[in-house]
Image (tube, rainbow, N blue to C red):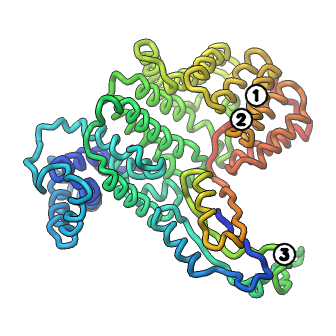
Amino acid sequence: MITTVESLLREQAPHVLGALVRRYGHFDLAEDAVQEALVAASVQWPDDGVPANPRGWLITVASRRLTDQLRSESARRRREEAAFAQEPATPGVAAPPDEHAPAADDTLTLLFLCCHPVLSPTSQIALTLRAVGGLTTAEIARAFLVPEPTMAQRISRAKQRIKSSGARFEMPCAHERHEREAAVLHVLYLIFNEGYTATSGEQLHRNELTTEAIRLTREVRRQLPDDGEAAGLLALMLLTDARRAARTTADGALVPLAEQDRSRWNRAYIAEGVALVTEALGTRAVGPYQLQAAIAAVHDEAEHADDTDWPQILALYQLLERLAPNPMVTLNHAVAAAMVHGPHNGLAMLAALDDDTRLAEHHRLDAVRGHLWEMAGDLDAAKSAYQRAARRTTSMPERDYLESRARRLNHGIQPDP
Amino acid sequence: MLMVYGDPDESTLGWSDDHVTFGKCLAASGELVSCEGLADPVNATSVHRRPDGAVVTGGGSPRDTVLIGYYLIDCDGFERAVDLGGRIPGSGSSTIEIRPVMDVAGLEM
C-alpha cells in the first residue's frame, strides 16, 4: 500500500520537475535529479518528519544535485555536445528562476512531453509514470513484470529520444493541441488497462497502476475542465474500476459481468463516474471515452444483470460505431444487439468480422460467438467456439474461464436463460 | 518469446558472438527480459516421469530442428516482434519462431 509520504512525493514530483526544467532546462538530467531527491525524501521524511515546505525542500535538494551534475566535468562535455544538437530550453545555464509561472500547469506540460509522438507507447507509459507520477524505476518495472534494468534502459532511451528530437518543455501550439491531448489521454488509458487486467493478489503492483492512472487523469481533468473527453476518460476509469472487487474470485478466476456480486461494487466511484459522464455528455462535444463511460454507467446502474437497459446500451454502441468504428466496438455492439433482438441477430453481425484481419484470429470473436450460440441453444457450436477461443487467448485466467464454459456444456448443464 | 531453431545436421550449429551482441542491443533498447543460448544437443538429457518416479533416458530425442537459444522480449506489439525476429543474426539459415507468453492477467468476457 502507498504510504502518506509516498503519495505526497508522487503529488509533488511533476511540480518539482517542472520548476527545475523551467529554471535550468536539461529535462533528462533534471528528471534524474528529481528522482534522487524523491528517494532521499522517502528515506529521510518518515524518520525526521515532513518538512514545513515539502516542495521547497525537494526543489532545493534536486537543484543541488542537478547543478552538481551540470558542473561536473562529464556533464560539461555532454552539455557542449547537446548545444550542437539543440538549443537549450533557457538561454545560458541558470536563467532567472521563473517563480511566477503557474505551478499547476507543470503536470500538463510534462504529460505533453512524456507522451510525445516521437516515443513508442511503452516508452510513453514508462516515462509518464516516472516523470509525472513520481514512481521509481523499480516500482514501474515490478508493475510491468520486467527486470529493473530493462525498465531503466527504456526510460533512459525515452529521454534520449526526447532530447534528440528537440521536443521542448512547453505547451504544444494550438493547431496540434487537440492531437496531443488525445495522446495524453490514450497513455493514461493504457496505464489504467495494464493495471485493471490484474487478477490475483500477487499482482497488487499492477493494481497500483489503476490508482495512478485515475490520479493523473483527475489532474488532467482539473486542468482541462472544458475537455469532455478528459471527463469521459475519468468517468470510464471510475465506472470500470468500481467493479474491481467483484470481477475475480479469491483465487483469481474471472467472474463475468452478469454473474458478479453487485453489492461489492464501489458505489462512490459509480456515483462520481455517472455524475461526470452525465455532465460531459450534456455540455461538451461527444467523444468515444464519454460514450464508453456512458455504456459502463448503464451497466453499473443496473441493480441486477437482468435489469440492464440493453436498448440504451445498443443505442450507445450505434453512436460509438459511427464515431470511432473499430472491430472491438463491432464485437460489443453485436452482444448488445443479441441482448435486444436475439442471438441470431448478434451472430449475423459477427459474420462481418470474419474478414477483418484485425480480429479474425482474435480469441474474443470466438468467445462472443460461444456465448451467442449458447444463448441460441446450439450447444455444440457454442462448445467448439469456446474451445477455439481458449486455445487462442494468451491470458491464463481467460483461458481457464473459457475452458470452464466449454466444460459446463459438456456436462449438459443448461445455460442461464 | 523469439525462439531460434537450427538444422541439427549443420556443422556450425549454435549460439554465436553475433547472437550475444544482438542480445546486448535488445538490452540497450529496453526490450530484453532475458536471453540464453543453448549448448549443442549432444549434451541433452531427457527425463520421463513414470508412476514409480522419474527415469533418465539418456540423450535428447531426434528432431528435424533443434532449439539453439531464445530471446524473451517485452516490446510494442506483434509487428515489432516480427521485425526483431527478422534481425536475429543467422536467421537466413535458421528459423525463428515467435510465440506470445501467457499472461497471468485477463479481462472478464
* Rendered location of residue A341, percent (x, y): 77, 15
* Rendered location of residue B72, percent (x, y): 60, 65
Could you say whether the residue bearing mark 1 is in a helix, strand or loop?
A: loop
Residue marked by disc 1: A352
Residue marked by disc 3: B63
* Rendered location of residue A110, percent (x, y): 30, 43
Relative to A266, is A154 above or below? below
Q: Is residue A302 left or right of residue A226?
A: right
Answer whether residue A4 is visible to the viewer in this image: no
* Quadrant, the C terminus of chain A: top right
Q: Nearer the viewer, mark 2 or mark 3?
A: 2
Could you say whether the residue bearing mark 3 is in a helix, strand or loop?
A: loop
> Which chain is mark 3 on?
B
Could you say whether the residue bearing mark 2 is in a helix, strand or loop?
A: loop
Q: Is residue A174 left or right of residue A101?
A: right
Residue marked by disc 2: A356
